[in-house]
């Protein structure tokens, strides 16, 4: 069964998600710690701990492996114009990536936004490039930084905590000025927007920034 999530932050745009961290191999640094951006992950706190929020994310890990999953996802997106992959979790498997690509190809009427850290792993290079070559897809490579550093890629994102850290070519996410909601902005889905900079927010992220400033 296809289980999509709808979050008020995204103006009601649907997303398909997995459990955070356990499907995020890119969240682990070489020393075994979480990378800075993932230490403050919103998807490990608050509402994301409620059983009714966790259950679909856990079930989706098995569900995508069904033979009918691609055709059912395409049908589920028949009325969508925008779609967000991985409100939580990541594209942890090359086989899953191949199926997500098939959904993207079969839904040209949908603008897909797929944020990911899987660009760190060579075996994903080919499939991520194929996704990015589709006119209706923005694969956005996430930086591990919480101080505005960026990664290579045509569409990327980073986190910053003060304006001095902003990359010169960044488009700042203004959701924090609109009660945390996109409020009509669709920059993340737009292939022509090179870098999105998200202002660090939340109690957990504030703590990460304080600790980072001390070391
Ligand atoms: S940049 Fe725009 S589309 Fe992306 S999360 Fe922020 S408000 Fe939403």
Image: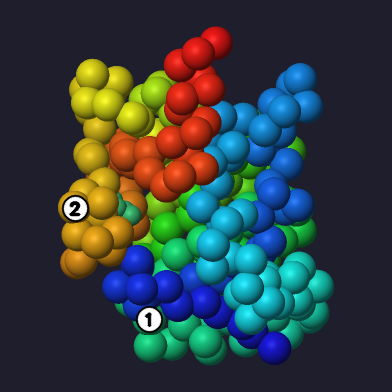
Q: Say what secondary structure mark 2 lies in.
A: helix
Confirm whether residue 144 shows in the render: no
Query: Disc 2 to disc 1, how far (Cα)?
Result: 26 Å
| Disc 2: which residue | 177
Determine whether 75 is above or below 96 in the image. below
As drawn, is 53 to the left or to the right of 195? right
Q: Is residue 43 above or below residue 120?
A: below
Rendering quarter of residue 171: top left
Q: Which residue is mark 1?
A: 80
- Residue 10, visible in the rendered structure: yes
SS state under label 1: loop
**Relative side of 111 to 28, left or right:** left
x then y, percent, for residue 207: 50, 34
Could you say which disc has been placed on residue 54 in the image?
A: none
Q: Quadrant of the N terminus?
A: bottom right
The image shows residue 214 at horizontal and vertical percentages of 50, 13
Relative placement, left or right, of 58 versus 145 is: right
Q: Earlier in the sequence, mark 2 or mark 1?
A: 1
Q: Residue at x 29, y 59 (%)?
A: 180
Q: Vertical placement of 83 versus 71: above or below?
A: above
Question: Residue 8 placed where, x, y %?
Answer: 36, 73
Indicate the quadrant containing the C terminus: top left, top right, bottom left or bottom right. Answer: top right
């Amino acid at each position: 069964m296809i289980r999509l999530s709808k979050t008020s932050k995204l103006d009601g745009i649907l997303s398909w998600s997995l459990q955070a961290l356990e499907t995020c191999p890119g969240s682990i640094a070489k020393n075994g710690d979480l990378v800075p951006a993932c230490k403050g992950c919103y998807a490990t706190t608050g509402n994301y701990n409620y059983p009714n929020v966790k259950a679909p994310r856990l079930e989706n890990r098995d569900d995508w492996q069904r033979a009918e999953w691609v055709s059912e996802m395409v049908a589920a997106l028949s009325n969508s114009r925008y779609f967000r992959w991985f409100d939580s979790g990541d594209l942890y498997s090359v086989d899953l990536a191949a199926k997500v690509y098939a959904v993207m190809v079969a839904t040209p009427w949908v603008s897909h936004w797929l944020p990911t850290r899987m660009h760190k792993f060579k075996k994903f290079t080919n499939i991520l490039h194929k996704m990015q070559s589709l006119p209706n897809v923005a694969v956005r490579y996430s930086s591990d930084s919480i101080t505005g550093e960026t990664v290579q890629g045509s569409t990327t994102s980073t986190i910053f905590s003060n304006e001095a850290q902003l990359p010169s070519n960044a488009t700042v996410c203004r959701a924090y000025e609109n009660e945390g909601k996109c409020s009509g902005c669709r920059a993340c889905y737009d292939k022509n927007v090179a870098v999105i900079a998200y202002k660090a927010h939340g109690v957990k992220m504030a703590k990460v920034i304080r600790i980072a400033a001390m070391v």
